[in-house]
Structures are given as C-alpha cells and as structure tokens.
Amino acid sequence: MTAITHNNEPASNKERESLAATEPDCIRTKTTSMAVLAKSAGSYHYTPEGRKLADFTSGVLVANLGHHPKRWWNRTLEYMGLNNIEGNSGYHEAVTLTSYNATTEVETEANRRLLSNMQAQPGGARMEQVLWAASGSEAIQKGLWASMARRPGEDVILATRGGFHGKKGLAGAVTGSEDDKERDPRVRFISFPKEECSTLEKRNEPIDLTKYREELEGLKAELGNKICALITEPYLGGGGSYHPQKEYLQMLESFCRENDILFILDEIQANFGRTGSLYAFSEYGVEPDLVALGKGMGNGVPVDAIVGRADVFAALAYGEGSDTWSAHPLGCAAVLATLDEFEGDDDIMGQAKGLSEIIEESLVKLTSLPAINAVRGEGTVWGVECNPVGDMSADETAHELVRLAYEGNSNGKAIHLLGPLAGKVIRIAPPLTMDHGEAREYFEVLHGIAASLGE
Ligand SMILES: Cc1ncc(COP(=O)(O)O)c(C=O)c1O
C-alpha cells in the first residue's frame, strides 16, 4: 500500500507510512484524509501536529455524547470499580473482565436499564430480552439466527434492497442487493423507495405504496410461510442516507403482522438519538419484534445487541448465541453510563433538536453550490450528495471535499469527514452535544470549502 501523505504533517505522515507497512489496506474504507488522531475531546479531534478538526461524524456515529465526556467516563469506571486504582504494584479488586459462563451485576443491571428504557418509548412494547453481541454484524447475525430457528425449515429472510447491515455472515447476506455478489439463497430483496425520498422536498410528499405492497404480496404468494423475517433500517445509512416516509416502514410492519413474519429494525446507526428520538422506532411509529443496537449505545466503547421478543430468542439453545466478548462488563458499564446521560438532566435530545435545525438550515444552503446535488436527513444524521465538477466524477468530488475539509480553510479551520457513502454521499452526523455557535461556525467553513470546488 502507498501511504496517503499531507503537506506539513511530518508526525502524521510517519504514522501513515508505518501503517502502510504494518496493516493491510482492507482494514479501512478508502479515505483521502486518512487522519491520524492524537486526541479527541467533545466535538473535536486533534492531530499529532496539534491541528484541531471539528468532528462532523462522531467517529462513525459512535460518540453521540461527544468524545470523552468526563462524567460519562467517571460513571463507566465507577460501574466497573476502576475509578480508584492506587499504586502500580499488585492487583486491584474490580468487576471482572469476562462474562463467559458467568455473569456480573453490571450485565444484569445493563439488561434491566436498557429494557426499561426501551419499553418506556412508543413502540418499545416487545423489548423483552437483550442478546448482546460483539459487533453490529454479529447482532444482526444472532437476530436472524433466532428468527430462522423459531420455525425450522421456514428460513427465507426479506431485506430492503440497498441496505447496510454489516459485512460478515448473514449480515453481509442481507446487505446490498441481489446483483452485488454470490447471494445467499435464503435472502430475497424488496424495493426501498429511494427515489421518493431522494430530496427533502420529495420526502415531504405523500408516498404511493401500492407497488411496494404488491411486491410483498407477490413474495408471499410465491413463498407462503417460508418467510420468517423482514429486516430493514429506519433509513438507508451506508446506502447513501435515504430517509423514507414513515408510512413505508409502517406498511412493512403491517405486512409482517398479517403474516406472522418477524419485523426486525436495524438501529445500529440510528439508536441513541440520531433521528430525533432515542430510538428511530418511536420516530417512525412502528413496534419492531427485534431491534439491533450498537455504535452510540456505548459512546465509543464497543458494545452491540439485538433486543426483543423472548419467545424468538428462546429458539436458540444454550451456547448458540455465545462468544468470548458478548455482554462484556466494560461494554455494559458504558451502556449504563450512556443511559445515565440520556436519562439525566442535561436534555441531550433537546440539544440535539436545536443542532438538527442548524444542520438542516446549513445543508439546505449547500444545495445552491455546483458541487452539491442534494441533501437528505433527519435529526442529526444527514447525507450530502455531490455532483460531478469539472473533470471530476461525483465520487471524485466527494473524495476531494473530504480531503479539502481535512486540510482546512485559509484560517486553519478544518473538519473531519468520513470517506463517502455509496460513492458520492458525505455523511454529516456531529455529536448531539456539539455547541450550537461552534456548529454554525463550522458549517460556514464547510460551505466555503464546498463552494471552492465549483470555482
Ligand atoms: C445500520 C448498520 N447496521 C449494521 C452495521 C454493522 O456494524 P459493525 O460494523 O459493528 O459490524 C452498521 C455499521 O455501520 C450499520 O450502520
């Protein structure tokens, strides 16, 4: 691999060169910035050269509360009994770092708190048990395993075309479409109304669901009771930020109810506040049987889960959903501390609402620029779709925007963005707690940089 380098970044370039020699390319998706992050705090990252980058993506939608909130860390460490280590010799008595064939009070408390938090939300009535997982893909995999085991032999899964549920195993099989790769014969794709929600204006128009309903009826006629589950995201995240009309998800849910098909909502990206509610199922007015959680749930500590109906999980026998790291106490402690913050007095969702208005207003202004084709989103999760500019394709424009934002404007104000989604869509998802004045300032910076692409 040839290392990406940037001018005037000797320390970062050294790290990038070391990385190129010591890791294969495949560990990351391609990003023109390839930022080396020395430290992070709140809504900012800092490079080894001391440059400050506004984090417009919360890591990868994980640091919803911002990076390293002090109270959140103190609580996480308190739940673990790790907040008071003295000296360097000997051992410290604290919550153990394993959950295999044993449990901890941190885990059982996290179960209680997470379930009661979810059950209290509109649409959370089926949230009866937590099946922890070590990654988002594994949460999806476990949910689908349980769904297939519920009625042996009836193992067809419907998945919305263009979705993203992970890269491994069954999570990879329900991702994308039938054209992508060799498909799992148990998975059938259904249409998602991308065109109908391709702009903010279109999303505000009523949607005609007839053809989507007919497609489902056709599959039912063909497959009968073989369909065990339907999996979708509240909005297509990795697929390019397509946020459908609520009626579409409600129609999918009704079809599932009428036919005893499990309705699985993948909220790994949406959960913990992104869409404007703590969980997107409340925002969309649906009541899923299973909900996949991850990313923001641990505010940066890796922890994932599939949550939902106990009778569905009961279809898996002892050990079938187990592995080394699932229900890890540190992850459970992080979930507890994250719940403390969302349930506390700081009104995180109120802050997020104000931020959402700033994001929408700022991004809508971007659409007047030649480099920008459309913006889409809700709450604090948005996509900016780029245009071809000059000799650059839309994908190249998007990559160039990421690079220029990283390098910063003439005043040294810089923004950290992820490599584009679906080729040409830039993700905008800052921490929910980003200061509103600073958010306005950095959206101006983004505007200036995007404007320079059309010059
Ligand atoms: C909606 C959704 N589902 C599943 C996943 C997969 O999660 P992981 O990368 O932890 O396997 C992601 C990751 O981006 C996601 O956005």
Image (tube, grey):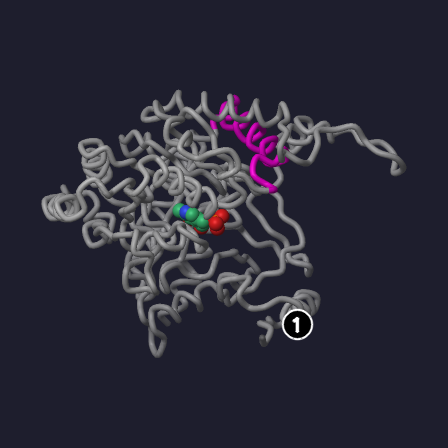
Question: In the orientation shown, which residue stands out farthest toward the bottom?
Answer: 391
Name the foreground residue: 29 vs 287.
287
At x 39%, y 38%, the residue is: 146
Which image quadrant: the C terminus? bottom left
Question: In the orientation shown, which residue stands out farthest toward the right?
Answer: 89
**First to last magenta residue range:** 324-347
Q: Is residue 153 above or below residue 240?
A: above
State the count of labels.
Answer: 1
Helix, strand or loop for disc 1:
helix
Residue 104 percent across, percent down from the top left = 64, 26
Name the foreground residue: 317 vs 416.
317
Q: Amino acid at mark 1?
A: Ala
Q: Is residue 250 above or below residue 222?
A: above
At x 41%, y 67%, the residue is: 452
At x 39%, y 71%, the residue is: 396
Name the foreground residue: 315 vs 128.
315
Does the magenta run of residues contain 338? yes
Q: Is residue 302 left or right of residue 140?
A: right
Work out whether residue 190 can be spotted. Answer: yes
Does the magenta run of residues contain 111? no
Work out whether residue 435 can be spotted. Answer: no
Residue 366 percent across, percent down from the top left = 34, 56
- The residue wearing badge 1 is 21
